[in-house]
Image (spheres, grey):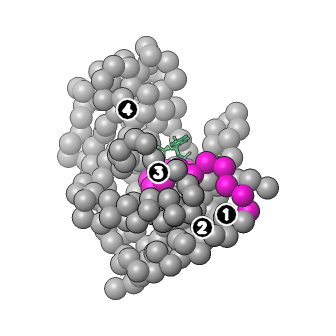
Amino acid sequence: MAHRTFIAIDLEEGVKSLLHAWARTVEARVTGLRVPSPENLHLTLKFLGEVSEAQVGELGEALASLAKNISVFDLRGSGFSLFPSQGPARVLWTGVLEPERQLLPLVEKIESRCLEMGFKREGRPFRPHITLGRIKNPEAGDHVRSYIEDNPSPQKTWTQTVRDVRLKKSTLSRSGPDYKDLIVAPLQIG
Ligand code: 3AM
């Protein structure tokens, strides 16, 4: 059976609650923003798409050997941002501060390992983000942009320790995506 998969960093419970609360404050003031449930909040490192059962096994081994050579690290982020950067917004997200320190090297290792395994390199530049809400129509996208521009909340930061990277399975349904861990690859402690 094939699985729709991606590699991600999971967020700590406290960070999920905090970020969900931020998203709810925007949702309360604009119409048309769809906020994911807190347990679905994550930081995508690499979208893989459909993979076979055999590839899941291979990815598990690759992620485990890669992760055990990378130390546990702290991740910090702040504020609200929007995709695309201009025009009606489609995604409300929060970004990572100083991604070049540990996050981008980790993503680069994952990209090159995935390339060796036959997965396509991501065409777009990697923009680390945690999706806080999705916007369906351009009118709502304009409202969200105006609200965020008036309330950029630069003082809002979040922080957590990254202890593992995960291969996640995404099941799409009418009620939204459902994510399940297929593999948890622990980073090196200390
Ligand atoms: O983590 P976020 O929510 O930004 O948008 C999808 C979601 O991103 C993205 O992978 C994450 C888990 O589904 N995604 C979905 N299809 C994609 C594709 N074809 C994709 N990313 C890149 N290419």
In the image, residue 171 above or below residue 165: above
Q: Determine whether label 1 and label 3 are within 8 Å by CB.
A: no
Query: Looking at the image, is mark 3 or mark 2 nearer the viewer?
Result: 3
The label on residue 83 is 4
Q: Mark 1 vs mark 3: which is more N-terminal?
A: 1
Query: Looking at the image, is mark 4 or mark 3 nearer the viewer?
Result: 3
Is residue 56 something one can see in this rendering?
Answer: yes
Residue pointed to by mark 1: 55
Residue pointed to by mark 3: 121
Residue pointed to by mark 2: 59
Between 106 and 41, the one nearer to me in the picture: 106
Query: Looking at the image, is mark 2 or mark 4 nearer the viewer?
Result: 2
Q: Dot 2 surroundings within 10 Å: few (below 14), some, or many (20 or more)? A: some
Is residue 17 something one can see in this rendering?
Answer: no
Q: Position of residue 99 (x, y in %)?
A: 27, 57
5 horizontally vs 149: left or right: right
Between 106 and 145, the one nearer to me in the picture: 106
Q: Position of residue 50 (x, y in %)?
A: 66, 49
